[in-house]
Image: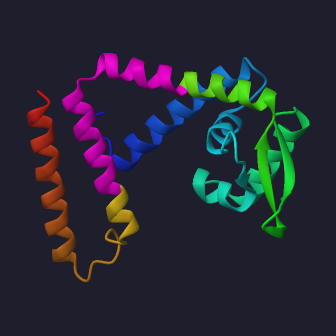
Amino acid sequence: MKDKTIDYILRATWQAVARMYNEEASKYDASMATGFALLSIDKEGGTPSTSLGPKMGMEATSLTRTLKSMEEKGLITRKKNPEDGRGVLIYLTDFGKEKRELSKNTVLKFNETVKQHISEEKLKHFIEVAETINELILDKNIFNHTSVSELAEQTEKTENDIAKIQKNNQ
């Protein structure tokens, strides 16, 4: 992946991870979104439906579809929020709690397998790079440059940082 852009590597890797999780979930008549929702719902106290979308990074329409499917499969129940009659709390059923454990074990298996193949130091660098990318995006530091020279300076700094990381990983 030497000549590929950072965004390409991120996208291709995430698509591979999503495909892997969806293939595993399909063995249980589920999807990655279902597994992620199971893990995002508080297993004892329930979770407000309005907080699930942001927590999962999912659009409302996709979340609604996922929750409807989960309810039809008996994984969740919806109850009015006693503190706010307009809101809805999502609770895991006993079956949902079983499937949550399965989802949790699947994620742990993925993490453990990655850790067996990548050194702790490389994982630490990977996490640092991912956090920096997220900070740059959240702080709107990608496309708010005032000049081409400032963008060139940032590009040079990024290339130097990448070269350092690559050198350290050899």
Q: Position of residue 140 (x, y in %)?
A: 37, 72
Quarter of the C terminus within the rendering:
top left
Q: Locate residue 9 relative to residue 47 in the image: left or right.
A: left
Q: Toward the viewer: 15 or 90?
A: 90
Quarter of the N terminus within the rendering:
top left
* Residue at the (41%, 20%) spot, across then down: 112
Magenta residues span: 107-133
Q: Locate residue 43 relative to residue 86 in the image: left or right.
A: left
* Residue at the (37%, 57%) spot, across then down: 134
Q: Position of residue 2 (x, y in %)?
A: 25, 35
Q: Locate residue 163 relative to residue 99 in the image: left or right.
A: left
Is the stretch drawn in magenta largely helix, strand or loop? helix
Q: Position of residue 152 (x, y in %)?
A: 17, 68
* Residue at the (22%, 81%) spot, across then down: 147
Residue 128 located within the stretch drawn in magenta = yes
Res 28 → quadrant: top right
Instruction: Answer above or below: position of 166 versus 144.
Output: above
Instruction: Answer above or below: position of 95 versus 65.
Output: above
Res 132 → quadrant: bottom left
* Residue at the (32%, 16%) spot, across then down: 116
The colour scheme is: rainbow
Q: Locate residue 75 relative to residue 155 in the image: left or right.
A: right
Instruction: Answer above or below: position of 99 versus 66.
Output: above
Res 86 → quadrant: bottom right
> Is residue 127 something that shows in the picture?
yes
Q: Toward the viewer: 30 or 155?
A: 30
Q: Position of residue 81 (x, y in %)?
A: 81, 61
